[in-house]
Structures are given as C-alpha cells and as structure tokens.
Amino acid sequence: MSTPWGKKSSKDGPKTKMLRYLGNNEKHQLAMYMQGHHRGTTLSCQYYLPIRLTFVDADRELKSLVRTAVAAVILKHPILQVGIAGADTKAPRFVQLDSLQLSNHIEWRHILDDDQGLNLCYYNLLGPELDAEFHELEKRPGWRVVIQRCESNRTFAVMFVFNPPHSDGVSAKIFHQHLLEEFIAQIETGTDDINRFIDGDILKLPSSPPELPPPIEQVMKLPVTPKLALKSLWHELKPPIFRREASLAKWVPIQLTPYKTRPRDFTIWLDNVNLIRASCRDHNTTVTGLIQALVLVSLSSRLHSTAAKAFKSTTALNLRRWMGSKPAGNPCLEPEQTMANYATHMTHTFDAKLVSSIRASLATDGDSSREKPKPLPLNMLDQVWIVAARARRDIEEKLDLGAKNDHVGLMRCVPGRQRRMRDAERRPREVSWSVANLGVIDGEIEGRPESIKYAQYTSSAEASGAALVVSLVTVKETELCVTMTWQQCAMDERLAAHVLYDMEEWLGQIASIKRGPPRWPADLEFIEYPTVVS
C-alpha cells in the first residue's frame, strides 16, 4: 500500500523516498500541467560533430557517447533524477528514484536526407513533442531528450523537452551547455566513471538522497505588501460583473480542448541581429522591449477597436539574478549552474489611449484582410521605439524592485491552485501575449570542433494564459531564432501567422535602416579604359 510519504511496499514495486514538498512556484506549474493548461517546453540545439563521427560505421559509437553524456548530466543535476508523488493532491512532493530506464528518456530519430529533411522532420516533431504528456510522474522524471540524426551532414539535433515543475528556460540552457561539455569529455577520455552506473538500458542512481535545489521561497525573501496581497485576493475572488478591464483578451476565448500547439518561427542572420541590437541601444531599449512593441503594433493594426481596445502582456524573468552565489543557508548552491524552476514574470499594460494612437498613425482600425506585411511608416517606427523604450523601463523598474511584490511571492496568498486553474477557465483571458528571451548560449569550447551551432526555444500553448507565446534564443555569434506558439482551437490561425510575419518584416526593416544605403569607399579609384576602335 502507498503511504502518505510516497513509500511503496515491495509488492507494489520499488521503494520511493520523499525528498521535499514542491515549492509554491513548482506547485503552480504542476497545477497548470495537471489541469491541461500547459504541457511542456523545449530547447533544441544543433550540435556540430568531429569528422570521424559523421560516417555510417560510427553510428553506434555516437549513440554510446551521447547516451553516456546524457547520463553524466543526469547524475550532475538532482532535479533530473526525481519523480513527483501526489501530483493531484494539495501536497505534491519530490521523491527519490533508484534508477531510470534510459529508453524512456532518450529517443533517436534517423533521417536519410540532407539539412532540408532534418528541418522538415524537426517541425513535424515539434508540435507533438510539446503537447505529449509526461507519464508515470512518480516513477519517471518529467523530461525527455529526442535526438535527430542526419547521416549526410555533420550535425545532430538534440531536443530537450521538460515539464516546468522540474526546470525552466535557464535550466534548459544549462542542460545543453553541460551536455556539450560531457560529450567532449567522453570523446577525449572515454572514462568509465559514468559507465559504471549504466547497466544495459538502466541508469543506476546513487543510493544516497540527492540534494535537490531548494524552492525559491527557502532561498530568498519574497516580501508582499498588504495592499498588493489584498488586491491580488480580490482579483481572484471578484465576480464576473467586475471584470471589465479594457485590456482583457476577450478576442481569444479560453478553450481547453482539443489541446494542440501550433508552432511557427523565423530566423534572423547574425549581421542583422547585430544591426538590430545596435538600433535598440540607440533608442534606449533591448530586443525584448522591441519585440513587445512590435507585437503590440501588429495586433493593434489587425484587430478592430471593438475587439481589443487595450492589451496586457508579460515578460519572463530569471529569479537567479537576485539569489546570488551560495545564498545564506545554502552554501553549496550556485543558482547560475543549477537546474530548477527559478522563473517569474512581470506584466505590461498598453492602455486604450496608446493603442488608439497606434491605429491613428497607421490609419487603420483592424485590417485583418491584409495578407502580406507592409513596412512601417517612419512616424510609426518612431512610435515603436517609444513603446519599446517604455517596455524596457518597465523591466528595469521591476529589476530595481527585486523580489518585492513578485508574482511568485504572491502565490502563497492564493490557496487551492488546481481550483484556481478551474476558475480561470470560466473567466475572460487576461494576457494577449508573452515574451521569453532566453538570451545567448555559448556553444563554443576553445580548440574543439564539437559545438552548438543553432538553438530554438519553444513553449507549448497556454490554454488560459497568453494567447501568443513568443520565445527567443541566440547562439553566440550566430543567428537569432524567434518562435511563436498558440493553441490551435482557440486562436485565429491567419491572425497569429500574420503577427509573426509582421515581426519578421519589421525587424528586417529596422536592420536595413541601421545598415543604411550602400556606399563606395572614399579612396576607390575608377579606371577609365581607352576606347578600342576596330
């Protein structure tokens, strides 16, 4: 029989030992998953191989090296070793596992084609992987790795898919950076330190309890003022008649089923990325602030004022910045190298006056019939930069405020998370879009041919959260990938696709303006050749 502490008798299977209860943020993420509001998140990276591992006869060696490297990362990060017991109760808890069946967490897909085939296979795989459930939460950690190998080139793609109670976007970056390091270590030394834990398809985990990273509320103070606590409580409990904010996203009704994520993306080459960043610095903003402004302008131009008078959006933030190295009471904790969910977000509100002025500048009030994106008029670009700078100021004010009155701190003021999710299903959607910028992945290790050449960060749809989820990531000295997802059954497909096309067009326009017209070098000499008379 199962006990309240998650232990099982030998008749029911292997014993599990409780390690700790989930923290407030972890329970919130778990409730979203259990109620079908969100499924998974993925960070996919393309790895560049040394020549000797590209041949067909090296396939078995490559699989062995990757499997051992993944095992090494698992043993390095305790959160990858644990299950969740009591996921549907008020007190879910992390439990220790004796072993992992690697085939449950590592899957290979072979493509007998070129780069185009690899890309096509990736996009056919991305949506289903984002939406796939994590089975047997108590027995299996909530993550998996899907590896795509194309035998005609020197790359293979690693898709790390995770359940947010276990990790966040920064954790996914850590996973890939450590996987690259361990992959190189296996190529160099072929050490048996990891292989001794592997018995066929089974990874034997250490018998001593893993030292799980603590929940954020045990690492740092998350103070909430009484005024904000009461305001938050009223927001959760107030009757529908009082939910009349102009920024509500009523144009995207909440619909849980059928749950299907629709992902789309585009890539910006390095030269244009540098030009866009330079333009952002010139206008006192960041790429995140610019993306916030561009989505606002796109939706304002394509939705009629009767459908959306104002908008609300969010920006994802990393709580690790306020934790510091080896925080008090946790002398072994290095947050910047620790896989855990230490994420939060902040809110931006774009009021009716601002949205109306954007529509006036574009001389439109919801031109949803416009198929192709058009360049922005210069006066509208000026307004884009004003909004982008304002979004950056919002973020800076939040960073200056620190963890005070943070979204995660408020979670302790709102009991009954799964009930809260069910209540949200009956309300109007609040957030129109979210932006999560994962920043830069350093995919190079000096003197080594193995490297990360490309990355894509993608979240599954938010059934009751942001209607559009925009995710960004860059590999150092390579291109920027922008991904957008939405729930197919709730969102107008054409509208969502047009927002993405607008962003791509306008980012290219900004790069082109920054580049300026082509100029001849000042010292260029034109040689006049004599006329040849026949």
Image (tube, rainbow, N blue to C red):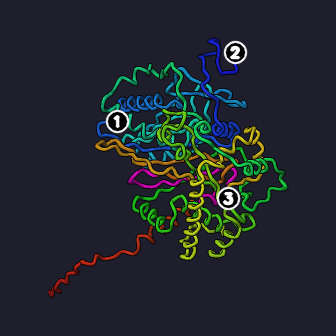
User: Visible in this render: residue 132?
Assistant: no
* Amino acid under disc 1: Ile
What residue is disc 3 on?
A: 312
- Residue 68, image x and y in percent? 41, 28
Residue at coordinates 39% horizontally, 38% vertically from top-left? 180
Q: Sequence order check: which comes first, mark 1 or mark 3?
A: 1
Q: Does 497 appear in magenta? A: yes
- Residue 132, image x and y in percent? 60, 38
Say if 406 sits above or below 109 in the image.
Answer: below
Label pair 2/3, CB-CB below 8 angstroms: no
What residue is disc 2 on?
A: 1
Say if 508 sits above or below 4 in the image.
Answer: below
What residue is disc 1 on?
A: 184
**Residues drawn in magenta:** 474-499
Q: Does 445 appear in magenta? A: no
Quarter assignment of residue 400: bottom right
For residue 33, the mark is: none
Q: Which one is in front, 245 or 135? A: 245
Q: Which one is in front, 300 or 132? A: 300
* Amino acid under disc 2: Met
